[in-house]
Amino acid sequence: MSETTAARETPDQALNRALNAAKIRHINEALGICKDVLTQHPEHPGALGLIGGILGQEGRVEEALNHLERAVAKQPNVANWQLNLCALYRSRNRLEDSLRHGQEAVRLAPESASHRVELALTYLSLGDRPNTSRCFREAMACDPELAAPHMGLGELLLAEGDYASGWLEYAWRNKGTLPKMVAAPWNGMKIPGGTLLIVADQGFGDMIQFARYIPMLTARVPNLVIGWGPEVTSLLGEYPGITHCFASWKEAPPHDAYVLLSTLPQIFGTTLDNIPMPIPYMWMKPDRVAAWGERLAAALPNRRLRVGLSWSGRPTHPNNARRSVRLHDLAPILAVPDVDFITLQKPFPADDRAYAQGLTNLLEVTDELTSFAESGALIENLDLVISVDTAVVHLAGALNREVWVLVPMPADWRWLTDREDSVWYKSLRLFRQTQCNEWAPVFAKVASELAARARAFPSQQK
């Protein structure tokens, strides 16, 4: 743009260019335009607000907060800026600030369903479940077709143990996300001689959790085909009842109906009292279990308590920041004597490599965990697994191996509320946060319990 043209451009026109650049991910261009506006018009609220929004999306939270607070100080009646502050303050566990800005966003835009969803998430972090439910329901009234409040309310109801109502809303999580299906959805009916396509529609942990329903399908439809990603094909591709497993849509064989794996609890009328518990419902190949036994015996010849460790979930998971920690955060646990820790972490965070190299009691085998089947075979040789809320928990639980789960607040729906046990896996013990983002008391309790377990462990040297 020429200097003459730029001189004739108003700040609003420039910011419109910046907004369009941001929409197509030309982030530096968008920020540059905003900064040019601020050079000519210091403290221009529109430029400050747009910079704050962009920086927040880029994860530069403190810079974003600074710009957005300056924007609302000049122009407090912009609902989207208040909304951004609500979300960013919640990510920093400044929940009272988040609540204040969320309430203001809803006041300024009472017709916006998304604003009420954001406020609901802050109430959830505060442990205020009645107001969380109210905000989700109000959002549904504003926009009945928006999936987010249905999903949020569904997970809230499931967490409270109201499975009958919860599954109905939980089903909204896949609205508009599936490719065009070529068969009818399955409702639980019998199809003699038929073929049912099972769609693995969620994360790895959900796939493993709901795989327990697969044997129940064969009584109604004899041929089951399933779409798994390559990461789990080796684990579930040979699952009893599965006649064919594929990794991409173009490989899907002809079928008479399809069903989303996540809808099976609803189809089978699952309540807290009738969760299928054929545990263990997964079995690792004996030769791989034996191979890992030999691997551990060679690397750790002095038999001590063997504890598998996983501390970070999938980075793209929407709640990963809440559930994951850094390896050095687990220092109280790692300091427990007479314990050998073995990594179950996949992938291994690059930022944790340096710290891990200084630990003499940590066996790092991440590169050898080429599939969930390999991870499962390793878990079969461990005495205990300690993990944040990720797929490792479900895998170990399905194998009926003992697991201590580090549970954040708010917790995922499947762990219910205020319980130390799991209704989905017999071998799990839950160590829960009592305050959002407050991990230190959890780690201290786990370390104390682990020390007692290590002292009681009957080592070969005794």
Image (cartoon, rainbow, N blue to C red):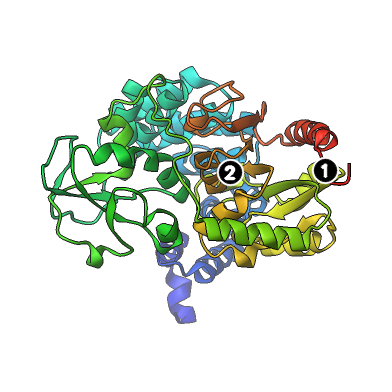
Of residues 417 and 139, the one nearer the viewer is 417
Residue at image position (11%, 47%) is 193
Total of numbered circles in the picture? 2
**Can the viewer see residue 73 in this picture?**
no
Q: Is residue 456 left or right of residue 257?
A: right
- Image position, residue 271 (x, y; %): 37, 22
Check if mark 2's residue and mark 1's residue have beta carbons within 8 Å: no
Residue at image position (47%, 25%) is 159
Name which residue type carries label 2: Leu
In which quadrant of the rendered image does the C terminus lie? top right
**Which quadrant would residue 332 be assigned to in this image?**
top right
- Image position, residue 10 (x, y; %): 44, 63
Say which mark, if any, is on residue 440: none
**Which quadrant would residue 189 be assigned to in this image?**
top left
- Image position, residue 79 (x, y; %): 45, 39
Which residue is situated farthest in the bottom direction here? 2
Residue at image position (72%, 46%) is 307
**Can the viewer see residue 144 in this picture?**
yes
Say which mark, if any, is on residue 88: 2
Q: Is residue 436 left or right of residue 118?
A: right
Q: Which residue is mark 1?
A: 459
Kindly report the distance in space between the C-alpha atoms of the residues bearing marks 2 and 1: 49 Å
Name which residue type carries label 1: Ser
Mark 2 secondary-structure assignment: helix
In which quadrant of the rendered image does the N terminus lie? bottom left
Mark 2 surroundings within 10 Å by alpha-carbon count, few (fewer than 14), some (14 through 19), many (20 or more): many
Q: Is residue 16 left or right of residue 248?
A: right
Of residues 20 and 370, the one nearer the viewer is 370
Mark 2 or mark 1: which comes first in sequence? Answer: 2
413 w.r.t. 417: above or below:
below
Mark 1 secondary-structure assignment: loop
Given this view, does label 2 or label 1 mark the residue nearer the observer?
Answer: 1
